[in-house]
Image: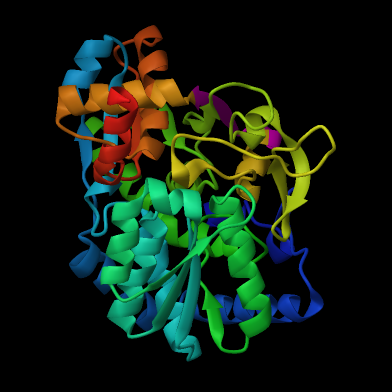
């Protein structure tokens, strides 16, 4: 872990007042054992060598940093680069974290893996890694998300995973997390929970951040090679926030680099219309950790909404919560309509269809870039490809 990363993490996973472990006692012991194991192995040369092998030869890293010339010209302002995580094997940034955690689970001797998924990208990545490592795989996915992302459900099943539709609550990502955590409490002695974003109790936010920081480390080297300097802005969508923290963390100490996280603004600012906890929520405890959370009028976790299943979550990573509270990063909201327009524009101008999640970041860049001088540089994390969303977008445009 670099000195930049160390500056962000306090003892036992607190980022300022955010993070921590608010879990049953028996689960706390399991998590602490896991944290200690991770600390003992993360810098082990043989572990890193094996991880880098898979990232290079299986995932296809490094992912390109692409100058979006036609989008830049169309907007008429800042120069826009895209960090092409959509070109990774399985179609998103999720595989970076999953391979790291799968190697951890393998070294711990665990043979059963469970995971939650929203848009299905983490589920596909987890199923892929479990096939690769010969481990049993169970994926919890909200019934509504199963409907929206039927293709990814089939992909997970094709890879040998058992997909369990979650029928309670809003039948989306929050409920899938609830089910996965309940499974873990019952089966922690034989099961590894492959958490997909930089959320949850310690040590998950730190582990996911560390594995996803390959994005920012590569982007730094690539932009220095292409432009001879660091970018002025980093931009990424934020649900739980793993793709964003992966881009942001290696630039944490670079005060000249502004960071902008783009949350799902949904259809409005009222409770139940969005999934933007930093923009419209307040600090609370959810799923075993403290973060900004979308709450209803009674102070309970609110129903949420986003056109992007992978962003439809009422909490956010504790490190993002800290970035916001400390002023290190800015967080804004892009609406469903903004994301839909960005999806279409990037497709038509660059021949690149972004995931609806990633389209939120593109949407904010579309608003921001024209007001900036042409010598300014924006790096957008294009966290996933839009193949999975094509049918949904078609139905929205032709419904």
Is 125 on the left or on the right of 183, as rendered? left
- Measured from the top left, where is residue 298 in percent x and y? 85, 37
Q: Total of numbered circles in the picture?
A: 0
Nearer the observer, 32 or 117: 117
Q: Is residue 348 magenta?
A: no
Q: Quadrant of residue 293?
A: top right
Nearer the observer, 184 or 168: 168
**Residue depicted at x 41% and y 30%:** 361
Q: Where 326 falls versus 219 (above or below)?
A: above
- Measured from the top left, where is residue 232 in percent x and y? 41, 26
Residue lying furthest right: 298
Look at the image and tell me in which quarter the C terminus lies: top left
Is 321 on the left or on the right of 79, as rendered? right
Q: Where 61 falls versus 163 (above or below)?
A: above
Q: Quadrant of residue 28?
A: bottom right
Q: Does any portion of residue 101 appear in the rendered image?
A: yes
Is 6 on the left or on the right of 18, as rendered? left
**Residue depicted at x 44% and y 39%:** 308
- Measured from the top left, where is residue 220 in percent x and y? 34, 43
Nearer the observer, 399 or 78: 399
Name the magenta segment's main secondary structure: strand
**Residue depicted at x 21% and y 68%:** 58
Colouring chosen for the image of the structure: rainbow
Q: Where 19 falls versus 34 (above or below)?
A: above
Q: Quadrant of residue 65?
A: top left
- Measured from the top left, where is residue 300 in percent x and y? 79, 43
Q: Which residues are magenta?
A: 325-334
């Amino acid at each position: 872990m670099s000195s930049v990363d160390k500056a962000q993490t306090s003892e036992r996973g607190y980022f300022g007042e955010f993070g921590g472990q608010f879990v049953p006692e028996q689960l706390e012991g399991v998590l602490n054992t896991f944290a200690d194991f991770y600390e003992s192995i993360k810098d082990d040369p043989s572990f890193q060598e094996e991880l880098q092998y898979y990232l290079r030869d299986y995932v296809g890293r490094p992912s390109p940093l692409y100058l979006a010339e036609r989008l830049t010209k169309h907007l008429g302002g800042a120069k826009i680069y895209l960090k092409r995580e959509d070109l990774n094997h399985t179609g998103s940034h999720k595989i970076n974290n999953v391979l790291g955690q799968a190697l951890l689970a393998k070294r711990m001797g665990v043979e059963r893996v469970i995971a939650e998924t929203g848009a299905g990208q983490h589920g596909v990545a987890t199923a892929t890694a479990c096939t690769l490592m010969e481990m049993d795989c169970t994926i919890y996915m909200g019934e509504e998300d199963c409907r929206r992302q039927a293709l990814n459900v089939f992909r997970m099943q094709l890879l040998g995973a058992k997909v369990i539709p979650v029928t309670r609550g809003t039948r989306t990502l929050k409920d899938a997390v609830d089910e996965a955590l309940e499974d873990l409490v019952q089966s922690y002695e034989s099961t590894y929970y492959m958490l997909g974003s930089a959320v949850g109790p310690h040590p998950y936010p730190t582990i996911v951040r560390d594995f996803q920081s390959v994005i920012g480390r590569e982007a730094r080297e690539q932009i220095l090679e292409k432009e001879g300097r660091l970018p002025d802005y980093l931009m990424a969508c934020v649900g739980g926030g793993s793709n964003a923290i992966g881009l942001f963390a290696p630039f944490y100490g670079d005060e000249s680099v502004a960071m902008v996280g783009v949350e799902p603004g949904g259809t409005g600012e009222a409770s139940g219309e969005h999934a933007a906890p930093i923009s419209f929520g307040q600090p609370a405890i959810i799923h075993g950790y403290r973060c900004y959370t979308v709450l209803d009028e009674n102070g309970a976790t609110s129903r949420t909404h986003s056109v992007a299943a992978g962003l439809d979550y009422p909490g956010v990573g504790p490190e993002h919560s800290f970035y916001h509270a400390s002023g290190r990063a800015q967080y804004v909201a892009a609406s469903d309509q903004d994301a839909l327009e960005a999806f279409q524009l990037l497709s038509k101008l660059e021949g690149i269809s972004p995931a609806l999640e990633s389209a939120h970041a593109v949407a904010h860049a579309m608003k921001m870039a024209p007001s900036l001088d042409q010598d300014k540089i924006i790096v957008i994390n294009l966290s996933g490809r839009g193949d999975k969303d094509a049918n949904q977008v078609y139905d929205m445009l032709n419904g």
